[in-house]
Image (cartoon, rainbow, N blue to C red):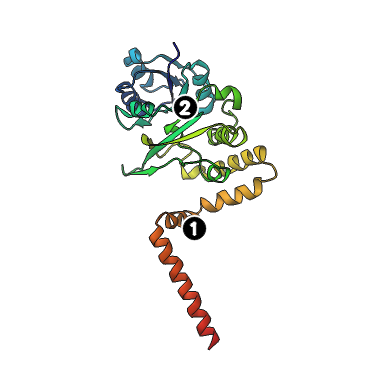
Amino acid sequence: MTRKLSIITVNRNNAGGLKKTIASVICQTFTDFEFIIIDGASDDDSVGIINEHSDHISYWVSEPDKGTYQAMNKGIHVATGEYCLFLNSGDYLTGSRILEQLFRLSPSADIVSGNVLKIRKNNKYRLVKSPEKVSLHKLCIHSLPHQATLIRRSLFEISGYYSETYRIASDWEFFLKALILGSKSYMHVELDVSFFSIGGISSNRDNYNLSREESFDVLKKLFPTLADDLMEYRDFYNSNTGRMLSLIKKKKRLYRLIDNLTGFLVDTKKKIAGR
């Protein structure tokens, strides 16, 4: 019988993170899922931890791979669930009932996305919400939170598996292909699904140039006539000015106050200039 969900965890020499991920999965009150772990030939205690919890793991392998996206693709190939959830080592579910709460909503869209809590180095966290609706402009600025997003498994046969050429941008490319070019269905759920530790390759500031290079390559490939404009738009909204504008717009009263103050200053300047 087909499971409702395949949870796929990719790991490489992150035994501590893997242990935390496994603990959050095996305590779930929802049980209609399979748990798949793809380990990249770790030489720390990762394999020992996997063996320790093997009764709760449907499939696992430890062998060399060419990176995160190849490992994810390996997981997809052996998955049998209706949906896939990628919960990589170090990521963990927010509570033992979160999957039960999620599937109680009877998700039926091709891609179902909740919210993620990004953990900073000081152990404080920031809530990152997935959008209510998706559009090219919204996805151009930010990808969906992978650790809180259900993807219909059959979608990978339609939109393609993750590109193994990139190190950072392949999940973003997949969402653009599926939701924008493929017009697949999308659903936002107002649930905080998982915790995500900042510090991986995609969230490391040192990899900004690589991220930008890959992102621009994706845009040129998928939207050749719009790529330059979309990249400029993406760069602006991911700049400090763009982030500040976004925050101000979320605070409607502050936005109105600044708007009114700006109008007042402009009028005052005009009056002074006219004297």
Look at the picture and state if 11 lies above or below 262. above
Which comes before the other along the chain, label 1 or label 2? 2
**Kind of residue sitting beneath label 1:** Thr
In the displayed structure image, the side of residue 264 where residue 127 appears, left or right: left
**SS at mark 1 in the image:** helix
* Residue in view at x 56 percent, y 46 percent: 137
Near mark 1 (Cα within 10 A), the count class, few <14, some 14-19 or many ≥20, is few
Q: Quadrant of residue 174?
A: top right
The quarter of the picture where residue 120 lies is top left
Residue nearer the viewer, 163 or 13: 163
Residue 237 vs 189, above or below: the answer is: below
Pick out the residue farthest to the top.
1
Which amino acid, by three-letter code, is at mark 2? Ser
Question: Which residue is farthest bottom?
Answer: 275
Q: In percent of the image, x 49 and y 20: which residue is there? A: 75
Residue 156 in the image, given as x and y percentages of width and height: 56, 24
Per the model, the C-alpha gap separating discs 1 and 2 is 38 Å
Q: Nearer the viewer, mark 1 or mark 2?
A: 2
x and y, in percent, of residue 88 in the image: 42, 28
Q: Position of residue 51 (x, y in %)?
A: 35, 14
**Numbered badge on residue 241:** 1
The image quadrant of residue 178 is top right
| Observer-nearest of 61 and 185 | 185
Mark number for residue 178? none
- Name the residue at 37% across, 43% down: 127
Q: Residues within 10 Å of mark 2 (few under 14, many from 20)?
A: few
What residue did someone put label 2 on?
Answer: 108
| Residue at figure coordinates x 41%, y 21% from the top left | 43
Residue 196 location in percent, x, y? Answer: 39, 36
Question: Pointer 1 and pointer 2: residues touching (CB < 8 Å)?
Answer: no
